[in-house]
Structure formats: structure tokens, C-alpha cells
């Protein structure tokens, strides 16, 4: 009789343990599912922004309406960026955006290529001015490869942040001036960074980015960048969102001088 009680008791313990194991398995599975849902929320928010970005670029939305959308969308992206572990990367972590190059590759004299006059973000593809620095690679034969290494040159993210828009579809008949480009939003500096004329995009919309991360290969994509008169370069822009979320151009020359190599 005693033996029967002992056997029943042991059986009870074993079945309890099995239940424990099952419970743990269920917990872990639901954790994985919720993680997937998390990152897809940031992707969804950024894809929404990308649609807005395309409308602005193609002059298909009025500027006051577009600004209102930015005021709604950017805080949501910012909140989700931090919720998913995105960090604040200060200026001392910023990285020169062309691997193997330094400030001597910046076009103009002492940053004179930066011409923000009459630039308005909401003019899209028709914008005036050149609120950017062009950073040139050694590419006399215009094959988009560095003449010394015969390799494509990595475009590195200057800041941290999240990819809020990319353009991957470009061919020589396209009217797009930026060609294959990337927009990255840095929540820490409240800025939008723009990397244009790439040959290859290596990130996706909604992806969290670290300073110095490879995001693209330098190229010659874009209406004017494709033309023979244009030496191969990265077009690099910073727009800071003002208190009203209006993107205003910033001269990055001094930041580029200080950036890590
Ligand atoms: Zn440029």
C-alpha cells in the first residue's frame, strides 16, 4: 500500500515538471513572437514615412500638409526607436561617411560646396541650392570603384538612428537627382541625414543603424551624378528638425573634420 502511495506521488511530481517545461516553452515562444511584432512596428512606421517622403520628393503633397504629417510621424518613430533599444549617439561617436577617406576628399575649398540658399525641403526633387557636401572618391575611369584598390567604397553612417526612407529603383532614364539614396533619422540630434548617388543600398527601411555602420556603396546614380562631367561622389546632407519639425539644412563641415576615421 505504501509503495502505491509513493508511486502515485512520484508520478504527480513528474507530471508537474512536464507542465513546468511546457509553460516555459510557451513563454519563450510568445517572447519571440512579441519581439518580431516589435521590430515590425518600427518598420511599418518607417514605411509610412517613406511613402510621405516619396510624395514630398515628387511634389505630390502640399508643404503645410506634409509638415503636419512629419509632426505626427516623427515622434512615433522616435518613441518606437527607443522602445526597441535604439540609443542616443552623441557627436563624439560620429564617423566620416566614406571608408578609407578623410576631409581632404570633401569638395570645394574649406567646405565651400555647401550652398543652402533658397533650399526648401518641401520643394522635393525640384529643390534649389546645394545644402550638402559632396565627398569624392578616386575614380578617373568612372566605374564607381576606387582606382587604387579596384573595390567599391563603403558609405558609412555618420550618425546613429533608423532608416526612414530608401530608393532602390533607379536607372539612367530616371529624373531622380538623388539616384539610389538613403534617409536616416537620428533621434538624438533630431536630424535627418541623406546619402545620395549610391551604387548599392545595403540597409532596409525601419532598420536601426549604428555610427560607422556600412549602409551603401558609393556610386554614380542620379540625374546629374550619372553624367560624365560629374566625378564619382557621395552627396551628404544634414537637416535638423526645428521646434516645429521643419527640416532645416545644417553645414556639417566642422563635424566632418572632427569625425572618426
Ligand atoms: Zn551634391
Image (cartoon, grey):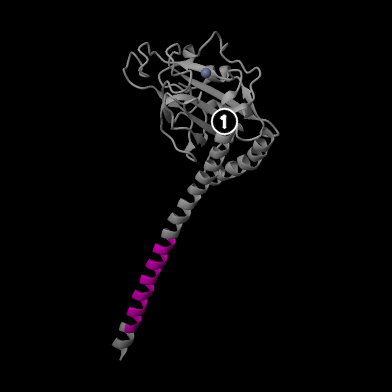
Q: Is residue 220 visible?
A: yes
Residue found at the far front of this picture: 173
Give above or below for 96 relative to 162.
above
- Residue at x-position 45% and y-position 38%: 204
Image-quadrant location for residue 12: bottom left
**Residue projecting furthest to the left:** 3
Location of the C terminus by quadrant is top left
Confirm if mark 1 falls within 8 A of ligand 1: no
Asked whether residue 94 appears in the rendered view, the answer is: no
Query: How packed is label 1: few (under 14 Cα within 10 Å), some, or many (20 or more)?
Result: many
- Determine whether the residue tagged by mark 1 lies in a helix, strand or loop: helix
On the image, the x and y values in percent for residue 146 come to 36, 16
Q: Find the residue positioned furthest to the bottom.
A: 1
Q: Residue at x 48, y 52 (%)?
A: 37
Q: Residue furthest top?
A: 109
Between 71 and 10, the one nearer to me in the picture: 71
* Quadrant of the rendered image containing residue 255: top right
Q: The magenta stretch spans which residues?
A: 8-27
Number of dots carrying numbers: 1
What residue would you read off at disc 1?
A: 57
Q: Please name the predominant secondary structure of the magenta segment in the image.
A: helix
Q: Position of residue 25 (x, y in %)?
A: 39, 63
Is residue 188 rendered magenta in the image?
no
The reply, left or right, for residue 50 in relation to residue 198 is right
In the depicted structure, whether residue 45 falls above or below residue 185: below
Amino acid at each position: 500500500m505504501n509503495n502505491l502511495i509513493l508511486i502515485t506521488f512520484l508520478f504527480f511530481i513528474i507530471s508537474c515538471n512536464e507542465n513546468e517545461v511546457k509553460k516555459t516553452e510557451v513563454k519563450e515562444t510568445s517572447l519571440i513572437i512579441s519581439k518580431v511584432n516589435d521590430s515590425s512596428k518600427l518598420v511599418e512606421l518607417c514605411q509610412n514615412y517613406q511613402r510621405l517622403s516619396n510624395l514630398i520628393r515628387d511634389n505630390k503633397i502640399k508643404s503645410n500638409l506634409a509638415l503636419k504629417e512629419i509632426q505626427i510621424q516623427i515622434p512615433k518613430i522616435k518613441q518606437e526607436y527607443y522602445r526597441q533599444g535604439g540609443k542616443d549617439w552623441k557627436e563624439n561617436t560620429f564617423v566620416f561617411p566614406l571608408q578609407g577617406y578623410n576631409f581632404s576628399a570633401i569638395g570645394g575649398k574649406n567646405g565651400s560646396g555647401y550652398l543652402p540658399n533658397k533650399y526648401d525641403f518641401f520643394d522635393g526633387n525640384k529643390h534649389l541650392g546645394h545644402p550638402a557636401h559632396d565627398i569624392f572618391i578616386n575614380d578617373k575611369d568612372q566605374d564607381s570603384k576606387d582606382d587604387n584598390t579596384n573595390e567599391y567604397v563603403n558609405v558609412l553612417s555618420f550618425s546613429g538612428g533608423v532608416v526612414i526612407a530608401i530608393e532602390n529603383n533607379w536607372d539612367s532614364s530616371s529624373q531622380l537627382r538623388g539616384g539610389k539614396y538613403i534617409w536616416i533619422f537620428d533621434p538624438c540630434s533630431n536630424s535627418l541625414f541623406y546619402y545620395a548617388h549610391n551604387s548599392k543600398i545595403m540597409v532596409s527601411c525601419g532598420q536601426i543603424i549604428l555610427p560607422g555602420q556600412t549602409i551603401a556603396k558609393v556610386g554614380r546614380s542620379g540625374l546629374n551624378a550619372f553624367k560624365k562631367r560629374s566625378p564619382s561622389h557621395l552627396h551628404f546632407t544634414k537637416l535638423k528638425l526645428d521646434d516645429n519639425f521643419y527640416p532645416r539644412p545644417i553645414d556639417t563641415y566642422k563635424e566632418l573634420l572632427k569625425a572618426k576615421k
